[in-house]
């Protein structure tokens, strides 16, 4: 059997050849993937990973595609989309598969009268991706209510043809060593399968109002009418008094940023006068400086050049090294 036949034997019509990544990312950018497979079970995921290993193929696993920049040249391997999307609510304990949309979980838990995830109504990605990068907005982060995750780990025996080459492991919140837009999973090959949260009892009517307020804030402060990966850069963390003093000599930081020891990337980009700057079809939003938009014809190359320009200006004028939140695929 060919590789295509093997993959289609597992996933059927959910296996596509030469599928454009532009169809699967919020940026609406990306070239063709040799094999694109949507998996709906852990068993399918394991079988596909074994096929990739046996044929020496690169793999890339993702959830919602909200935080990806895919290469114009595509990806010579297997891209796997996690599409396990069930969740279970038992009193205040919530377990969600990695492919559940964060916004859907926020609404479902609020409707059930549980508080703690209303902020996530504005997150465009999945639970798995959100936990991996400790996604956050409007005062909340994934780590805040997380209890543990289940991950798929490739055991060393896979390289020896073992019959059980994978392990499903439970990792606690402490195991993940969360930081600002960081977790240890980002630096491992573990694949998140599910996440469990502990929430609090609340009033469903009040929680619905919180959802509506959060969505309104998002609508008023973020551009929603063009393709983007959301906030492109991490906010800049000020790690010492000396660094704070150095920055204050270059720019008048708002008091809330001084207190938080974190400078908003969007605010910094605004101060650099880069709102509206455009390269090809990629443009810095006029509404929010930390959003780069696909105006309709942007390529990954356009976005990469614009990122380089922003980082260069921030480094030269403020002595700041901005770091991307977006994940690169196929570069």
Image (tube, rainbow, N blue to C red):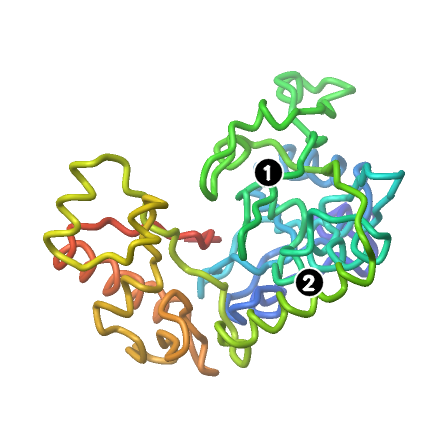
Q: Check disc 1 and report its element: helix, strand or loop.
A: helix
In depth, the one of 195 and 252 nearer the eye is 252
Q: Residue furthest left?
A: 249
Above or below for 163 versus 65 = above
Choose top left, top right, bottom left or bottom right for residue 138: bottom right
Measured as percent of width and height from the top left, residue 331 is found at: 41, 53
Residue, x 87% and y 43% (percent of image)? Answer: 88
Residue, x 33% and y 46% (percent of image)? Answer: 259
Q: Is residue 96 left or right of residue 279?
A: right
Residue, x 65% and y 52% (percent of image)? Answer: 63
Choose top left, top right, bottom left or bottom right for residue 270: bottom left
Q: Is the N terminus in the top left, top right, bottom left or bottom right quadrant?
A: top right
Residue 3's disc is: none
For label 1, the residue is 143
Above or below for 61 versus 157 = below
Q: Is residue 316 left or right of residue 69?
A: left
Residue, x 80% and y 39% (percent of image)? Answer: 95
Choose top left, top right, bottom left or bottom right for residue 215: bottom right
Disc 1 from disc 2: Cα separation? 20 Å
Label pair 1/2, CB-CB below 8 angstroms? no
Above or below for 67 versus 129 = below
Q: Residues within 10 Å of mark 2 (few under 14, many from 20)?
A: some
Measured as percent of width and height from the top left, residue 97 is found at: 77, 44
Q: Check disc 2 and report its element: helix, strand or loop.
A: helix
Measured as percent of width and height from the top left, residue 317 is found at: 13, 59
For label 2, the residue is 210
In depth, the one of 102 and 211 nearer the eye is 211
Q: Is residue 219 left or right of residue 5?
A: left
């Amino acid at each position: 059997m060919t590789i295509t036949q093997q993959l289609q034997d597992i996933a059927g019509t959910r296996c596509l050849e030469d599928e454009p990544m532009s169809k699967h990312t919020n940026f609406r950018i990306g070239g063709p993937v040799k094999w694109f497979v949507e998996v709906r079970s852990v068993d399918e995921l394991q079988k596909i990973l074994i096929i990739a290993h046996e044929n020496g193929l690169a793999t890339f696993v993702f959830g919602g595609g909200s935080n990806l920049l895919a290469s114009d040249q595509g990806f010579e391997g297997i891209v796997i989309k996690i599409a396990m999307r069930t969740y279970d609510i038992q009193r205040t304990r919530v377990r969600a598969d990695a492919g559940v949309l964060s916004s859907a979980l926020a609404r479902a838990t609020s409707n059930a009268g549980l508080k703690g995830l209303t902020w996530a109504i504005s997150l465009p990605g999945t639970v798995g991706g959100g936990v991996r990068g400790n996604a956050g907005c409007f005062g909340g982060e994934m780590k805040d209510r997380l209890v543990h995750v289940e991950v798929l780990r490739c055991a060393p025996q896979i390289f020896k043809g073992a019959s059980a080459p994978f392990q499903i492991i439970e990792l606690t919140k402490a195991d993940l060593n969360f930081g600002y837009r960081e977790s240890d999973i980002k630096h491992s090959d573990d694949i998140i399968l599910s996440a469990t949260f502990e929430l609090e009892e609340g009033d469903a009517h009040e929680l619905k109002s919180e959802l509506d307020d959060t969505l309104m804030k998002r609508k008023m402060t973020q551009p929603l009418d063009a393709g983007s990966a959301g906030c492109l850069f991490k906010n800049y963390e000020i790690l010492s008094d000396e660094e704070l003093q150095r920055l204050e000599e270059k720019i008048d930081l708002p008091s809330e940023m001084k207190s938080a020891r974190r400078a908003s990337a969007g605010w910094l980009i605004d101060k650099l006068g880069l709102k509206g700057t455009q390269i090809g079809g990629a443009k810095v939003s006029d509404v929010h400086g930390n959003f780069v938009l696909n105006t309709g014809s942007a390529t990954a190359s356009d976005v990469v050049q614009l990122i380089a320009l922003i980082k260069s200006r921030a480094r030269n004028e403020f002595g700041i090294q901005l770091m991307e939140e977006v994940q690169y695929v196929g570069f």
